[in-house]
Image: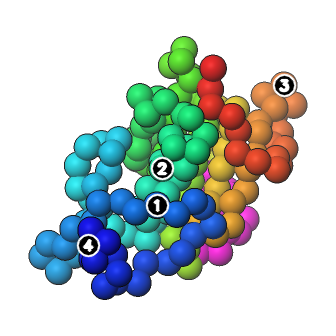
């Protein structure tokens, strides 16, 4: 695993170091996803998502059983997929994370995409990240407004 990681250049991210299980097959690089328990093609966005999964579980004590990845939802008759949703222990959306490749600049367009997903889920917390820059938001449902936060929300109770 380490030798394969050393043979390829994966971008360093502004998240704790993580050494996932990597495999090469059919000229593609694959990563083992511990939530879905299967190998996935390692895209730049997947690299960011896997770092977030590791960070939340290993460093923030989020329970693994509360994660849902690439969950489908409909918006204006279009099928969309969220990158990462963490549920609370009552089964309600708690945190929505929109992951972008490290080369993607976080912009108003990125925020609008995440807000489209948020309109359907109504999670109280939202993170937008390209692995290097992270925007932490909390949602005030009474005022229908987002507030930027300094840090990642604590694990759900």
Cβ atoms at labels 4 and 3 below 8 Å apart: no
Measure the C-alpha gap from mark 2 to mark 4. 19 Å
Measure the C-alpha gap from mark 2 to mark 3. 33 Å
Q: Where is residue 85 in the image (x, y as percent from the top left)?
A: 51, 39
Question: Which residue in the rendered view is the most extreme toward the front?
Answer: 2
In the picture, the disc for residue 18 is 1
**In this view, the mark in front (2 or 4):** 2
Question: Which is more N-terminal, label 2 or label 1?
Answer: 1
Q: Position of residue 27 (x, y in %)?
A: 17, 80
Any magenta on residue 113?
yes
Q: Tell me: residue 70, above or below residue 120.
A: below
Cβ atoms at labels 2 and 4 below 8 Å apart: no
Q: In this view, does 104 lie to the left or right of 139?
A: left
Q: Is the magenta stretch mostly helix, strand or loop?
A: helix
Q: Which residue is painted at 37% across and 69% down in the image?
A: 43
Check disc 2 and report its element: helix, strand or loop.
helix
Work out whether residue 5 can be spotted: yes
Residue placed most toward the observer, 143 or 135: 135
* Highlighted magenta segment, given as a residue range: 104-114
Q: Which residue is painted at 50% across and 78% down in the image?
A: 11
Q: Mark 3 points at which residue?
A: 142
Q: In which quarter of the image is residue 152?
A: top right
**In this view, the mark in front (4 or 1):** 1
Q: Is residue 66 left or right of residue 136?
A: left
Q: Which residue is painted at 41% across and 28% down in the image?
A: 65
Q: Mark 4 points at which residue?
A: 29
Cβ atoms at labels 1 and 2 below 8 Å apart: yes
Any magenta on residue 6?
no
């Amino acid at each position: 695993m380490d030798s394969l990681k050393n043979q390829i250049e994966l971008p360093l991210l502004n998240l704790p170091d993580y050494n996932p299980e990597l495999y090469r097959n059919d000229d593609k690089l694959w990563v083992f996803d511990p939530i879905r328990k299967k190998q996935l093609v390692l895209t730049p966005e997947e690299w960011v998502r896997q770092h977030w999964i590791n960070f939340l579980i290993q460093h923030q004590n989020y329970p693994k059983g509360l994660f849902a990845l690439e969950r489908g939802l409909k918006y204006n008759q279009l099928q969309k997929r969220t990158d990462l949703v963490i549920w609370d222990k009552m089964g309600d959306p708690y945190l929505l994370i929109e992951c972008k490749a490290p080369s993607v600049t976080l912009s108003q367009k990125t925020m609008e995409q995440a807000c489209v997903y948020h309109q359907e889920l109504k999670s109280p917390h939202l993170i937008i990240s390209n692995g290097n820059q992270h925007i932490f938001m909390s949602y005030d449902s009474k005022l229908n407004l987002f507030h930027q936060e300094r840090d990642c929300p604590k694990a759900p109770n």
